[in-house]
Amino acid sequence: MALIDCPDCGTQVSDMAAACPNCARPIAKNTPVQPNPAPVATPPPVAPVASGGVPGWLKWVGGGVLAAVVIGAIIPDNTIKIEKLSSWDPLIGIPTVTAEMVNTGNSMRINYWVKKRGSETKHCRGSTLFATNERRTLKFNCNALKGYNGTFTLEWAPAT
C-alpha cells in the first residue's frame, strides 16, 4: 500500500482506495476509469477540525476576540457620554451644573470643564473617576454661569 497523488486534484490518496476522498475520482487499479469530458468544479475545502472539535478558523476568530478583550483592558476606551445637561442659577448662591453621564467602557479618570457658547475659555474645571460601565449624575458649582442666560457645553478628556 502506498500514497499516490490523485490525477485530477492532486490530493494524496492510498493506491488501494476505491476513489479520491476529495474529488471522487476512481483510484483503485481494479476500478475502471471513465473519461471525464467536462471539467467538474471541486467543492471548496472544508475547514479542518482540530482536536476537541473546534474548527481551525474558529480558533483564529476566538484568538482575535481574546486579543481585543486583552487590548481593551489595557487601552482606555473613551466611551463616556453626556446624556442630559442642565443648570440651576439661584437668586442667591452659586449656579449648579448637573450632568447625567454614562461610561460604557473601561474605568478612567477624566477632566471636565464648562464652555460658554462662542468662547474657548474653560470654566469650572474638575476631575472625577468613572468605573467600568458606570452611570452617574455629576453635580458641581459653576460661578462662571452666574447671571448667564446663554447656552453652554460640558466637555471632558481623559486625565493625563
Image: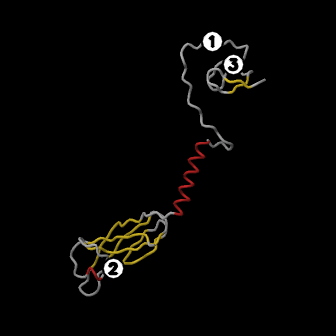
Give the mark nearer the N terminus: 3 vs 2.
Answer: 3
Q: Which residue is mark 1?
A: 34
Identify the mark at residue 88; answer none if there is no mark: none
Identify the mark at residue 124; answer none if there is no mark: 2
SS state under label 2? strand
SS state under label 3? loop
Identify the mark at residue 27; answer none if there is no mark: 3
Q: Residues within 10 Å of mark 2 (few under 14, many from 20)?
A: some
Q: Residues within 10 Å of mark 3 (few under 14, many from 20)?
A: many
Q: Give the side of residue 147 with respect to residue 7, left or right.
A: left
Cα–Cα gap, marks 1 and 2: 87 Å
For this rendering, which residue is in front, 105 or 117? 117
Q: Give the side of residue 159 with respect to residue 62, left or right.
A: left
The residue drawn where x is 31% and y is 70% is: 85
Cα–Cα gap, marks 3 and 2: 83 Å
Assign the C terminus to one quadrant of the image: bottom left
Give coordinates of residue 78: x percent, y percent. 43, 64
Give the mark nearer the N terminus: 1 vs 2.
Answer: 1
Give coordinates of residue 23: x percent, y percent. 61, 23
Q: Residues within 10 Å of mark 1 (few under 14, many from 20)?
A: few
Which residue is situated farthest in the bottom direction here?
A: 92
Give the mark nearer the N terminus: 1 vs 3.
Answer: 3
**Colour scheme shown:** secondary structure
Q: Quadrant of residue 7?
A: top right
